[in-house]
Image (cartoon, helix red, strand yellow):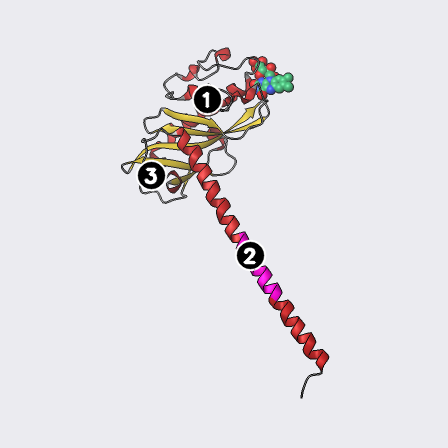
Amino acid sequence: MALPEISRSMIKNSLVLGLFAVVTVGTVALTQLGTASRIETAQREAQVRALAQILPNGSYDNHLLDNVVQVFDPKLLGLKTPEDAYIALKDGKPSAIILKAVAPDGYSGAIHLLIGINANGTLAGVRALNHRETPGLGDRIDLSKSNWILGFNGKSLSNPDDSGWAVKKDHGVFDQFAGATITPRAVVKAVHKALQYFDAHQQQLFATERTPKQESN
Ligand SMILES: Cc1cc2nc3c(=O)[nH]c(=O)nc-3n(C[C@H](O)[C@H](O)[C@H](O)COP(=O)(O)O)c2cc1C
């Protein structure tokens, strides 16, 4: 039986609308997928650049993001959740690690740090990642504002000794800033504790049989 003209027209319009909806949803989904993967790539590249700043050229020959171990230590690293640490390899052997640590007691709260430690226990470099320290005072921990953070290069648990791991105002070896002692004091303490963490866990962190994303406490 032939459908009345009006029903045929309704079916046709519904089909066209349905097809339009499918095409639109598909296009949006594909665009989102493409954008997400571009953002992920950009984030990965930014992360690699930040990590590469800390370790000298030629001191490793792996892709740092490919050798990751998860670490979690609220006391020595100030972490609230497990975080990735990056193992640098040279000729297949661990040459350094980059840890994330948090100094909880900055002037304006937490200061997030990247701390590179060579396999021999000396500091390869430290960088302040995120913080809310005051511009012109505490923000001199940023390499873009001053070279203060480079003062950690080459230091270790034994150089200086325990009492030296403080700002000069507290009889240590690290400079404070004019009118701003709280920020550098917090960073010095956090870096010292990260070295203690590394000293206690080096063997686990550098274990060659480790599977990616295994946790190390
Ligand atoms: C508005 C304002 C912002 C400040 N920001 C910082 C800061 O970011 N980092 C810091 O160490 N001190 C900052 N200070 C100074 C601290 O209050 C403190 O006087 C200084 O760190 C010296 O600390 P000390 O007495 O323990 O040596 C700020 C002070 C004021 C009034």
Q: Secondary structure at mark 3?
A: loop
Q: Tag 3: residue type?
A: Asn
| Residue 55 is covered by the magenta coloring | no
Q: In the image, which residues are magenta? A: 20-32
Q: Residues within 10 Å of mark 3 (few under 14, many from 20)?
A: some
**Circle 3 or circle 2, nearest the eye:** 2
Cα separation, mark 1 vs mark 2, equals 44 Å
What residue is pinned by disc 2?
Answer: 29
Q: Earlier in the sequence, mark 1 or mark 2?
A: 2
Q: Quadrant of residue 59?
A: top left
- In the picture, measured across the screen, residue 20 lies left or right of residue 189, that is right
Ligand 1 is found in the corner quadrant, namely top right
Closer to the camera, 122 or 46? 46
Q: Quadrant of the N terminus?
A: bottom right
In the rendered image, residue 144, in percent from the top left (x then y), is placed at 50, 24
Q: Earlier in the sequence, mark 3 or mark 1?
A: 3
Cα separation, mark 3 vs mark 2, equals 35 Å
Q: Quadrant of residue 126?
A: top left
Q: Secondary structure at mark 1?
A: helix
Residue 149's disc is 1
In the rendered image, residue 193, in percent from the top left (x then y), is placed at 45, 25
Task: Identify the main secondary structure in magenta.
Answer: helix
Q: Residue at x 45, y 13 (%)?
A: 172
What residue is pinned by disc 3?
Answer: 62
Closer to the camera, 193 or 128? 128
